[in-house]
């Protein structure tokens, strides 16, 4: 029976059966909304049984560990890390048809995000805490916190700017709407949402926060 083969995966493999791994089905939550944001940013559903989250092995290693913990917490599944040859790129790879199926049902689309013009799922848009968590996931993956320098009367000034980039127009509009609801002043130009005022960058990091230590350390330095 299927139950016997699930209990004895080695025998199942010998007989040529592929069993579906048991996973935890998480409730809709702040953690799931954040993971959806991460998937909309640097995630990809490669096939009906595999998903990946890309990261920079040099600069984002700590954040990748956070993502891996989130996957374990949400779904009780393991992952592998696959480094790409000749670059600093790497992928967290989760092989589970059940996790992929679950994410598709939550509104994540398979394939190219730009071609599909992806958007934040409707269930997240109905809850402010979910929206904040999803925005956090998006900015932690497809955002940047950088130093802007300018000169006035031979004196240099510098301050932090926050930028979020997406080539999906619906996703960009939805992210812009969340920033607005949170009272964070932004500008939307082309594929960029920029938070320029120091007070509003501080407001974003105080209200939404970040799980990406690269951002947090940069913020602390300023």
Image (cartoon, rainbow, N blue to C red):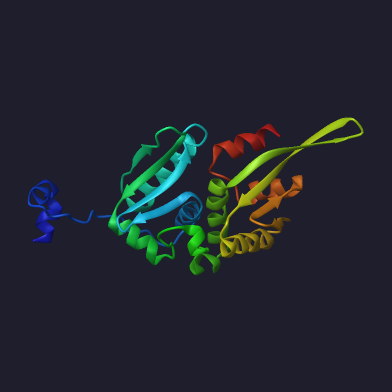
For the residue pair 222 and 41, the one nearer the viewer reads as 41
Residue 218: x %, y % from top left? 64, 35
- Image-based side of 21 in relation to 32, left or right: left
Residue at point 49% right, 61% down? 115
Which of the image's four quarters has the C terminus?
Answer: top right
Residue at point 61% right, 34% down? 217
Residue 107: x %, y % from top left? 44, 65
Residue 200: x %, y % from top left? 73, 50
Which of the image's four quarters has the N terminus?
Answer: bottom left
Report which quarter residue 171 is drawn in: bottom right
In the image as oriented, which residue stretches furthest toward the right? 153
- Count the marks: how many? 0
For the residue pair 27 and 5, the one nearer the viewer reads as 5
| Residue 206 in view in this figure | no
- Image-based side of 40 in relation to 174, left or right: left
Report which quarter residue 147 is drawn in: top right
| Residue 4 in view in this figure | yes
- Image-based side of 143 in relation to 105, left or right: right
Residue at point 65% right, 48% down? 163
- Image-based side of 154 in relation to 109, left or right: right
Residue 133: x %, y % from top left? 54, 55
For the residue pair 118 and 175, the one nearer the viewer reads as 118
């Amino acid at each position: 029976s299927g139950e016997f083969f699930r209990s004895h995966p080695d025998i199942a493999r010998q007989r040529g059966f592929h069993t579906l791994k048991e996973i935890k089905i998480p409730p809709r939550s702040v953690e799931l909304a954040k993971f959806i944001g991460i998937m909309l940013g640097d995630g990809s559903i490669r096939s009906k049984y595999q998903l990946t989250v890309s990261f920079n092995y040099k600069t984002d290693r700590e954040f990748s560990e956070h993502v891996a913990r989130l996957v374990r917490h949400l779904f009780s599944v393991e992952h592998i890390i696959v480094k790409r040859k000749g670059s600093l790129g790497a992928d967290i790879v989760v092989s589970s048809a059940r996790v992929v199926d679950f994410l598709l049902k939550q509104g994540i689309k398979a394939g190219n995000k730009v071609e599909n013009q992806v958007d934040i799922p409707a269930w997240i848009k109905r809850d402010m805490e979910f929206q904040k968590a999803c925005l956090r996931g998006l900015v932690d993956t497809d955002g940047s916190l950088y130093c802007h320098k300018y000169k006035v009367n031979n004196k240099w000034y510098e301050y932090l700017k926050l930028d979020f980039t997406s080539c999906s127009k619906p996703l960009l509009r939805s992210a812009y709407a969340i920033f607005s609801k949170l009272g964070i002043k932004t500008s939307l130009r082309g594929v960029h949402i920029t938070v320029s005022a120091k007070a509003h960058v501080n407001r974003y990091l105080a209200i939404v926060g970040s799980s990406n230590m690269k951002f947090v350390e940069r913020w602390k330095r300023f």
